[in-house]
Image: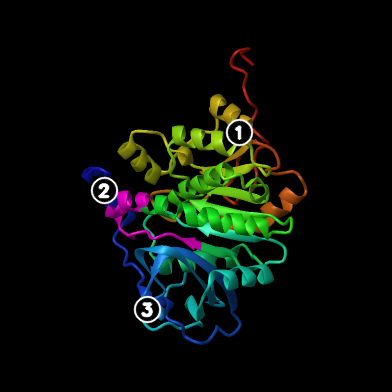
């Protein structure tokens, strides 16, 4: 558990912002004129709320639940921002839920296949998220990244509390079977198209555990279609090494975004007394060599602007440059082989794969 002194520091760094509540996702029945509507599918291990409009709670459900949301993005949306309602929701100025429908699992999978003919993406949020925050963050990233299909939010039952780190860690463990099952079904139905899996912070640990379970279960075909991106993963370096040993080489290189100045991961490392993967220094020759050996692409995103003083949320800003990065990847010039890269503040590559220094030969 995080020590009290570390929690105090975390509270000072994050400030005392008011959390959005369930009223922010009550359906308004309309989209913004001249705005954009994003269809977001939800798979969750959260318990359903008593009032359907409230979505899902922080309690753990014995079975996964599924839903579909239509999220209205206001015409004046600023990339990286969530325009939260201040009072009554106004689709002209605020993110708003236009409609919400709960689904059974088979209907959920059919609707995903129909909406994502060229592949789909799954976002797994991190520690200290309530459901409205996770839902609207998914919509913000989908809008900024200009994703044409309907992305999936996998939302696990975070307690949405700074004091809930230990509880959240148990909840991601509780959720790994459900995520593994979802990724297996998506991989099987992908028809050769990639399934992008994006895990942030503690969500990265959940993604790795799901991949590990899939490999143990022999789901090699489904794994071969997964394109995995981890942003600031809150994973003990030794644990990550053991996870990779079981997962083995992914057909599509795994991408890991790191920032050595990530203060949230510094706090996590102090609490657990072990270095976190998301805070690795990619200039270390040993780390560079390990990345190549494991078919992992390490990207230092320290130059990208952070939205908080914890420097733990830089991935939010990268959504708007995602189309350009995809274009570079399709040309075969970026992130197509394991190694280490650096991004500048605009999300552009400023170095080829860093040279792996052979320390034994002094080169």
**Residue 256: image location, x then y, percent:** 56, 43
Look at discs 2 and 3 and give the one toward the viewer. 3
Cα distance in 3D space between marks 3 and 1: 45 Å
Residue placed most toward the observer, 355 or 237 = 237
Location of mark 3 (residue): 23
What residue is rendered at 49% in x and 45% in y?
A: 209
| Mark toward the start of the polypeptide (1 vs 2) | 2
Please tell me in which quadrant of the rendered image residue 149 appears. bottom right
Residue placed most toward the observer, 190 or 285 = 190
The image shows a total of numbered marks equal to 3
Location of mark 2 (residue): 7
In reply to whether residue 160 is colored magenta, the answer given is: yes
**Residue 178: image location, x then y, percent:** 49, 57
Q: Give the secondary structure at mark 3.
A: helix
Whether residue 62 sits left or right of residue 71 in the image: it is: left
For this orientation, the residue located farthest to the right is: 331
Location of mark 1 (residue): 294
Is residue 332 visible to us here? yes
Look at discs 3 and 1 and give the one toward the viewer. 1
| Mark toward the start of the polypeptide (3 vs 1) | 3
Cα distance in 3D space between marks 1 and 2: 34 Å
For this orientation, the residue located farthest to the front is: 217
Is residue 315 visible to us here? no
Cα distance in 3D space between marks 2 and 3: 28 Å
In reply to whether residue 185 is colored magenta, the answer given is: no
**Residue 139: image location, x then y, percent:** 53, 68
Magenta residues (range) = 154-170
Whether residue 36 sits left or right of residue 306 in the image: it is: right
Q: Are marks 1 and 2 in contact (CB under 8 Å)?
A: no
| Mark toward the start of the polypeptide (2 vs 3) | 2
Residue placed most toward the observer, 81 or 53 = 53
User: Where's the N terminus, which quadrant?
Assistant: top left
């Amino acid at each position: 558990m995080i020590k009290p002194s570390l929690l105090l520091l975390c509270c000072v760094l994050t400030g005392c912002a008011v959390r959005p509540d369930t009223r922010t996702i009550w359906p308004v029945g309309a989209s913004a004129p001249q705005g954009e509507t994003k269809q977001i599918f939800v798979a969750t291990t959260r318990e359903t709320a008593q009032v359907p409009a409230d979505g899902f709670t922080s309690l753990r459900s014995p079975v996964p639940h599924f839903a579909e949301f239509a999220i209205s993005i206001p015409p004046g949306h600023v990339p990286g921002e969530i325009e939260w309602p201040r009072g009554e929701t106004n689709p002209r100025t605020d993110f708003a839920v236009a409609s919400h429908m709960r689904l059974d699992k088979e209907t959920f999978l059919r609707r995903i296949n129909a909406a994502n003919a060229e592949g789909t993406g799954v976002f797994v949020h991190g520690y200290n998220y309530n459901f409205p925050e996770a839902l609207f963050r998914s919509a913000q990233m989908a809008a900024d990244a200009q994703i044409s299909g309907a992305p999936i939010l996998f939302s696990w039952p975070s307690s949405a509390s700074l004091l809930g780190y230990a509880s959240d860690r148990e909840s991601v463990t509780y959720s790994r079977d459900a995520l593994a099952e979802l990724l297996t079904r998506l991989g099987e139905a992908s028809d050769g198209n990639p399934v992008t899996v994006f895990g942030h912070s503690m969500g990265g640990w959940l993604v790795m555990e799901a991949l590990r379970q899939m490999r143990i279960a022999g789901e090699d075909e489904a794994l071969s279609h997964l394109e995995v991106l981890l942003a600031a993963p809150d994973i003990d370096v030794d644990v990550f090494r053991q996870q990779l040993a079981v997962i083995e080489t992914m057909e599509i290189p795994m991408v890991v975004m790191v920032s050595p100045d990530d203060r949230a991961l510094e706090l996590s490392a102090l609490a657990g007394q072990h270095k976190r993967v998301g805070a690795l220094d990619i200039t270390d020759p040993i780390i560079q060599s390990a990345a190549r050996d494991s078919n992992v692409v390490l990207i230092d995103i320290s130059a990208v602007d952070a939205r908080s003083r914890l420097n733990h949320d830089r991935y939010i800003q990268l959504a708007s440059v995602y189309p350009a990065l995809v274009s570079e990847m399709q040309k075969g010039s970026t992130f197509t082989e394991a190694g280490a890269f650096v991004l500048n503040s605009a999300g552009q590559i400023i170095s080829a794969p860093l040279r792996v220094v052979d320390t034994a030969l002094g080169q």
